[in-house]
Image (cartoon, rainbow, N blue to C red):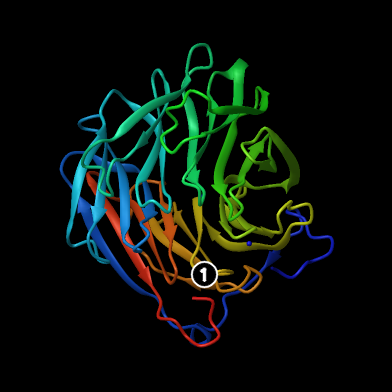
C-alpha cells in the first residue's frame, strides 16, 4: 500500500553502505509491544492497516480454526478492541488488508478455489461483510503474493500470482465498485513464464496502482493508468527480492532484500525511470515491509532471522540518511506488516508459537520534521 533529490547513475547494483546517524540527531521512538491474540495457533500471517482515526486494525490467520480474524483496536495501545471472524471457508494461502477514506476495511485472500475480496460492513468487520470471488484457480493453481490497496475513491486494486510452475502468472484486478461485486472488474496480465514472482501493490495519491515485482532476480515497477487498462513497466535493477512498496502522493518508496538478506531501498518519482536514494543496511533481514509516516518519512520493519528480532530502519527524508532504530521483540516467524499514519506506525508480527503481537511506534512531532 511521493520530491526527492536525484542521483545520476544510481542503480540497485551500485549500493551505498551507510552507518546510522547519531541517535541524538533524532527524537527517540516510543514503542508499545502487546500480545493481541493468543487463543490457538494465531498470527503466523497477518496484515496491519490504519483507520482514518489513526487506530490500528489487524487481520490475522488462525491456523487452528482455518479462519481470518480481524482485530479492531479502540485505543492506540490496543488494550481495548474487538475481534471478528471474516472468512472461514478453507485454508488461506495468503492475504492482505487495506482501509480507504470510508473507514471500512477490505481484505483480499487466496484460498483453494481462487482469490476473494472481503469488504467489511463496519469498521470492525462485525456485520454486513461482502465476500466476492475475483479469480479462480482452475489450471493456474493456488495464488500467492496477494496484495491489496484502495485509493481516495475507495476502489480496490489487487495483485496476485499463480503458483503452478509451467503457468506462473502475475495479475492485477482493478475493481469498479468498493466491494468488487459488479462483475465488471478489469483484470491485467502483467507477466508470465516459469520464474516465481514476488510482488506488492500500492495505490498512489492519483488513484493509480503501482506494483513492485521481481522475476528471475530482476525488480520491476509497473504503473497503471486509470484501471490498469494501460500500464508502463520499468526495470529498476537487480538484486532486490521480496519487494514492498509504499506511496505518499506521487512519490514511491520500495524496500526489499538481496540474496545475502541485506535490506535495500529505492526512492523514485512517478515512473521510477531513474531510481534514487539507493541504500543498503548491513544487517540481515527477510520480508521487509515499508510505510510512509509523513510526506517524505518512511519506516521499514523486518525480521532479523538469526536472532529472531523485529527491527526497524527509520528514514526521516530519504534512506540516504537513515537512522537505525534497534527496537527488538522476539518473533518466531518471518511475516511482518507495517501500517503508517501521520506520526506513528503499527507493526503486526508473530510473537510466539501461538501469539499474535502488535507493536505501536510513536514519535512526537518536532519543528522541521516531516512527522
Specify few, some or many for label 1: CA neighbours under 10 Å numbering under 14, 14-19, or 20 or more: some
| Total labels drawn | 1
Residue at position x 19%, y 46% in the image: 83
- Where is 60 relative to 184, above or below? below
Residue at position x 51%, y 52% in the image: 152
Q: Name the residue under label 1.
A: 294
327 relative position to 90: left or right: right
Residue at position x 53%, y 23% in the image: 163
Residue at position x 36%, y 34% in the image: 118
| Relative image position of residue 358 (x, y in whole percent) | 30, 57
- Where is 157 relative to 89, above or below? below
| Relative image position of residue 11 (x, y in whole percent) | 77, 55
19 relative position to 80: left or right: right
> Depth check: 84 or 94 in front?
84
| Relative image position of residue 368 (x, y in whole percent) | 55, 85
Which residue, as the protein is rendered here, is positioned at the far right? 9
125 relative position to 94: left or right: left
| Relative image position of residue 264 (x, y in whole percent) | 62, 57
- Where is 295 relative to 242, above or below? below
Which residue, as the protein is rendered here, is positioned at the far top? 139
Q: What element carries label 1?
A: loop
Amino acid at each position: 500500500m511521493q520530491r526527492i533529490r536525484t542521483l545520476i547513475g544510481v542503480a540497485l547494483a551500485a549500493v551505498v553502505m551507510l552507518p546510522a546517524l547519531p541517535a541524538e540527531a533524532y527524537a527517540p521512538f516510543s514503542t508499545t509491544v502487546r500480545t493481541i491474540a493468543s487463543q490457538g495457533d494465531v498470527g503466523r500471517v497477518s496484515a496491519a492497516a490504519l483507520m482514518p482515526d489513526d487506530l490500528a486494525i489487524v487481520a490475522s490467520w488462525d491456523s487452528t480454526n482455518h479462519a481470518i480474524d480481524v482485530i479492531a483496536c479502540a485505543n492506540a495501545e490496543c488494550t481495548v478492541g474487538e475481534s471478528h471472524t471474516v472468512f472461514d471457508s478453507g485454508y488461506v494461502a495468503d492475504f492482505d488488508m487495506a482501509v480507504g477514506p470510508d473507514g471500512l476495511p477490505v481484505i483480499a485472500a487466496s484460498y483453494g478455489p481462487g482469490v476473494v475480496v472481503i469488504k467489511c460492513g463496519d469498521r470492525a468487520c462485525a456485520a454486513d461483510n461482502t465476500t466476492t470471488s475475483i479469480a479462480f484457480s482452475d489450471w493456474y493453481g493456488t495464488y500467492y503474493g496477494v496484495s491489496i490497496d484502495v485509493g481516495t475513491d475507495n476502489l480496490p486494486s489487487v495483485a496476485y500470482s499463480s503458483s503452478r510452475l509451467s503457468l506462473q502468472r502475475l495479475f492485477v484486478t482493478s475493481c469498479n465498485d468498493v466491494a468488487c461485486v459488479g462483475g465488471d472488474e478489469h483484470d491485467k496480465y502483467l507477466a508470465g513464464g516459469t520464474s516465481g514472482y514476488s510482488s506488492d501493490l500500492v495505490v498512489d495519491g492519483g488513484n493509480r496502482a503501482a506494483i513492485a515485482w521481481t522475476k528471475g532476480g530482476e525488480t520491476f515497477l509497473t504503473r497503471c493508468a486509470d484501471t490498469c487498462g494501460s500500464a508502463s513497466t520499468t526495470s529498476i535493477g537487480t538484486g532486490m527480492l521480496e519487494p514492498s512498496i509504499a506511496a505518499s502522493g506521487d512519490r514511491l518508496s520500495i524496500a526489499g532484500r538481496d540474496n545475502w538478506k541485506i535490506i535495500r531501498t529505492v526512492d523514485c518519482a512517478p515512473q521510477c525511470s531513474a531510481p534514487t536514494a539507493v541504500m543498503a543496511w548491513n544487517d540481515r533481514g527477510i520480508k521487509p515491509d515499508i510505510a510512509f509516516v509523513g510526506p517524505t518519512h518512511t519506516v521499514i520493519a523486518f525480521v532479523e532471522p538469526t536472532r529472531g528480532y523485529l527491527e526497524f530502519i527509520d528514514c526521516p527524508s530519504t534512506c540516504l540518511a537513515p537512522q537505525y532504530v534497534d527496537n527488538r521483540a522476539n518473533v518466531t516467524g518471518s511475516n511482518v506488516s507495517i501500517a503508517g499514519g501521520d506520526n506513528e506506525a503499527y507493526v503486526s508480527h508473530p510473537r510466539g508459537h501461538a501469539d499474535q503481537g502488535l507493536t505501536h511506534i510513536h514519535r512526537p512531532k518536532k519543528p522541521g520534521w516531516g512527522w
